[in-house]
Image (spheres, helix red, strand yellow):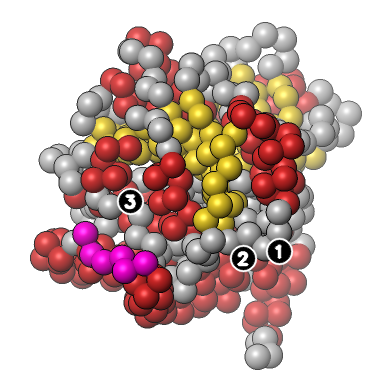
Amino acid sequence: MARTARTQEEIRRFLDIGAVQVAELDLNGEGTALRPGPGSPPVTHGEVFVLVRRAGRPVGTLLGRVPEGADPATVLAALARRAHGQEPAEGRGQGQGAESSVAAGPPPPHTSVVVATRERAGQLARALDSILAQDHPGFEVVVVDNAPVSDETRDLVERKYGERVRYVCEPVPGLATAHNTGLAAARGEVIAFTDDDVVADPCWLTELTAPFAADPGLGCATGLILPARLRTPAQVLLESHGGFAKGFTPTTYDPKEPPRDEPLFPFTAGRFGSGANMAFRAEALRGVGGFDPATGAGTPARGGDDLYGFVRVLAQGHRLHYTPGALVWHHHRETWADLETQAFGYGAGLTAYLTAILVNRPALLPAFLARVPRGLSHARGLTAVRDTGGGDGGGADAPGDRGAAPGDHDTRTHPWPRRLSRLQRKGMLYGPVGYLRARRAAGSRTGWGTR
């Protein structure tokens, strides 16, 4: 279908978005305390997206410009102290910093790390190298090769990682199915899930899993996801509108004490975290039947498997904790076509997971219906054409806007294209249909039913 003139103009503006360097800086570190992001070259002049830490703990992000000839560490450290010089506030409810809970509490439980992958051995090796370098005192790694068409992944695991990584093949396509296979194979008290396109911070697994030892009622934990690279317009645009990050305030969600500022709780599960950085108490996840195999990438539902898991565990009375101390660096998709696929998939996954929740847990229907009016308003907001804050709702950046890259998350330094908003709305309409198609296919293969 031919693109409209407006869409062509949006793509032109999209292509004008420049690359941004990625770095991290520790305000309490020794020396310059500035280092490039994982896999990035040393920082030089130009725009820089900076993760600011304090004594190793992530406290915020900023966008800085380093003038030509200036020392990057000096310029960015001054900006970081101005933006993040104060101690961060504590989170809501039981939310405490992961650093303090790790230091003061019992050691983290034995953990299984499950990585589902499909024909991406190069990316998988990078992820596994970072996972095996974790400071966690006791964990195993399970790679689930999902519907492989070659032996590349098996050969990589057996040749490079030997007994350090267990290989499991799952012939049925679908991320939720692969995760369920990993769940069945895992031996840990806690099971962490991440993707093959991340680089895990060295203390990621300890920070993510220590809260389980401190809180027996905790069923799920999620962590911070930041961009590993901002080299293409697609990567910059996505991060400009929040990316996958959920902020820098540790937060505990308790179904017995719903947050007053989230009237749609627990159905706005996207606020809790993302599948690239999540962990479950094995007993709790198995108790709800694992993930719905009719959700997730690789199925007609296109996504929503992680959101399904969050809500099902919360609905069973378990708490969920978000900690920014558990950090992974994510390699965002790189092209306009990737963003189109992603926008449709996000919309489809959202309504697919809601359909899955109501099909598998009909008792939640009254609570869901009570939230429908506000939910429709929320959906309109999700798919609106998001402006930079001073433009016309879809045109060029407002005069005076730097419009170069993300700084603090969701600052919207670039307008969100109408084309992507439309695709997200189409995906939301398609989601229930996609889920039911995937459910029929999954049922015909496995006899899987409702739980």
| Stretch of the chain drawn in magenta | 446-451
Residue of label 2: 339
CB atoms at circles 1 and 2 under 8 Å apart? Answer: yes
Residue of label 1: 335
Q: Check disc 3 and give the amino acid type.
A: Gly
Residue at the (72%, 45%) spot, across then down: 155
Q: Secondary structure at mark 3?
A: loop
- The residue at 11%/62% (across/down) is 363
Q: Residue at x 37, y 67 (%)?
A: 446
Residue 38 seen in the figure: yes
Up the image or down, 224 lies above or below 99; here it is below
Other residues around mark 3 within 10 Å, as few (<14) / some (14–19) / many (≥20): many
Position of 302 relative to 143 (above/below) = below
As displayed, is residue 419 above or below residue 294? below
Measured Cα–Cα span from mark 1 to mark 2: 7 Å
Q: Amino acid at mark 1?
A: Thr
Q: Does dot 1 land on a helix, a strand or a loop? A: loop
Left or right of residue 400, residue 350 in this image: left
Q: Position of residue 161 (x, y in %)?
A: 68, 32
Disc number for residue 290? 3
